[in-house]
Amino acid sequence: MDNPSAIKSKAVDDAKTQPVTAMSVVVPAIAWLIPGAGHLIQKRWIRGLLLMASIVCMFALGLLMQGRVYKPNGGDILDILGFVGDVGAGGLYILTRAMNWGQGAIAHATADYGTKFLIVAGLLNFISVADAYHIAIGKKP
Amino acid sequence: MTLAHFSAAVLFAVFASVVFGITQRNTPRDQIRYGLYCFAMFVGGVFVAGWVMWLLRH
């Protein structure tokens, strides 16, 4: 079994040897702003389109189900976490706030599902951003 | 738009499985296999949770 401190020092060494390229900075930003675009600009066409379709459809369904979009807040911890999840959707969140969508009061069970769809779409986009970054730095094919 | 509970759960499973499959595995074959595995787990979990709730209710 490997020594934990050896693993940690190897991880630190790997981070030091990882060059900071333009792609490693631009890709996460683009990937966050437009779901799937981080893969598309790296010519991972099918992966990018599938990620884009999944995240955009999930977010759109959340809005159609009258889910609630969280605003920046400093109140209840669940509201703060809801905002963190929502903001992961990047451009979709910005567009939604700009158009004043997602203001519906939760009046039935599927509206609450809609709120969860919106949050999970944002969280899935965070995973997608991390994946695009790993491709950009050559850690993933 | 109003979806049934089951429809909403299946759609959730589809979208989450696609993202998990693509991001958590490296080769296309593994990505498809893992995506299908996640989908089966999500939908299986829905049925298990449904039966647990039925048992609690009765």
Image (cartoon, rainbow, N blue to C red):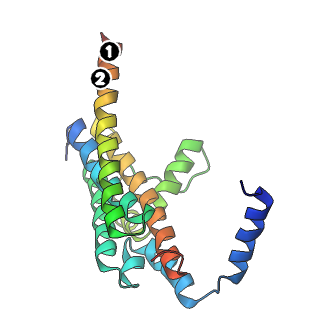
Which residue is drawn at the image coordinates 44% and 61% (left, top)?
B24
Residue that carries the numbered disc 2 in the rendered image:
B51
Assess disc 2: are there few (<14), some (14-19) or many (≥20) residues with their C-alpha within 10 Å of its C-alpha: few
Circle 2/circle 1 CB separation < 8 Å: yes
Which residue is drawn at the image coordinates 25% and 49% (left, top)?
B11
Amino acid on which the number 2 mark rests in the picture: Trp
Residue sitting at the far front: A1
The answer to which of A58 and B10 lies nearer the viewer is B10
Residue that carries the numbered disc 1 in the rendered image:
B55
Assign the C terminus of chain A to one quadrant of the image. Answer: bottom left
Amino acid on which the number 1 mark rests in the picture: Leu
Above or below, A121 against B46 in this view is below
Which residue is drawn at the image coordinates 42% and 63% (left, top)?
B25
Q: What element carries label 1?
A: helix
- Judge if badges 2 and 1 mark residues of a common chain: yes
**Percent position of residue A72, x then y:** 54, 57
Residue A66 visible in the current orientation: no
Q: What element carries label 2?
A: helix
Above or below, A79 against A31 in this view is above
Residue sitting at the far right: A5
Residue sitting at the far top: B58
The answer to which of A140 and A67 lies nearer the viewer is A140
Above or below, B43 against A84 in this view is above
Assess disc 1: are there few (<14), some (14-19) or many (≥20) residues with their C-alpha within 10 Å of its C-alpha: few
Say which quarter of the image contains residue A105.
top left
Which residue is drawn at the image coordinates 35% and 49% (left, top)?
B38
**Percent position of residue B1, x then y:** 19, 47
Q: How far apart are marks 2 and 1 (CA)?
A: 6 Å
Q: Mark 2 lies on which chain?
A: B
